[in-house]
Image (spheres, rainbow, N blue to C red):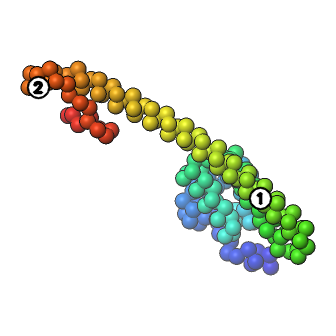
Amino acid sequence: MAEESRGELKPIGVVARETGLTPRAIRYYEEMGLLRPAVRVKGADRLFDASDIQRLSEIKRLREVIGFSLAEIRELLETDDLRAQLRDQFGRTSDPMDRIRALRQAIDLAERRLAIISRKLAQIETIRAEEQARLARLQALLAHELARQPDPSGSSATVSAPSGSTTGRS
């Protein structure tokens, strides 16, 4: 049977608990075309196999940990699907030209994936640089304010700003 070759099929509630996603999120990912459940019976729960659970875990990781948009996730998942096809194609042939063609296509896919990741890293680096500049402005402002404070001993010496990101004042 085809269903048996897929392994154990699980309803959406079980899959939601296993992946840490809500059933609503899983249905949304399906509506967005990021996921196609292994089995969908009219009037019954969707049923998911191990590959579906793995794909949902990958979507969650890409979305929550790395911060990819759904469009970026879709593009990455499409390259995953193409990579799997190329892997099968490569394994089914011993013709050197076919294998070279499959490898070149796999390299193109890897370069596409790397470009997506590089774009995200550049966006993150821009945000990081903005936050570093904000921190530097705040530290300079603190140093300026501390320098304006009179010395408690009565001399005209200035007070230097503390190092680090805390003010050191109560």
Q: Secondary structure at mark 2?
A: loop
Please name the amino acid that badge 2 sits on.
Pro
Q: In which quadrant of the rendered image does the N terminus lie? A: bottom right
Tell me residue 51's x, y (percent).
69, 67
Q: Give the crowd class for mark 1: few <14, some 14-19, many >=20 residues within 10 Å.
A: few
Farthest residue to the left: give it: 153
Q: Secondary structure at mark 1?
A: helix
Task: Determine whether 91 is above or below 42 in the image.
Answer: below
Task: Determine whether 83 is above or below 139 in the image.
Answer: below
Tell me residue 26's x, y (percent).
64, 55
The residue sitting at 33% across, 38% down in the picture is 165
* Quadrant housing residue 107: bottom right
The residue sitting at 70% across, 53% down in the picture is 113
- Marks 1 and 2, how far apart at CA: 67 Å
Depth check: 68 or 133 in front?
A: 133
Depth check: 15 or 142 in front?
A: 142
Depth check: 87 or 5 in front?
A: 87
Q: Give the crowd class for mark 2: few <14, some 14-19, many >=20 residues within 10 Å.
A: few
Which tag, 1 or 2, sits closer to the chain's start?
1
Q: Decide if residue 57 is on the left or right side of residue 109.
A: left
The residue sitting at 24% across, 26% down in the picture is 146
Q: Is residue 31 visible?
A: no
Tell me residue 58's x, y (percent).
63, 59
Q: In which quadrant of the rendered image does the C terminus lie? A: top left
Q: Is residue 131 visible?
A: yes
**Residue annotated with mark 1:** 107
* Quadrant housing residue 10: bottom right
Q: Decide if residue 146 is on the left or right side of residue 13.
A: left
**Residue annotated with mark 2:** 152
Tell me residue 36's x, y (percent).
74, 59
Q: Decide if residue 100 is on the left or right side of residue 63.
A: right
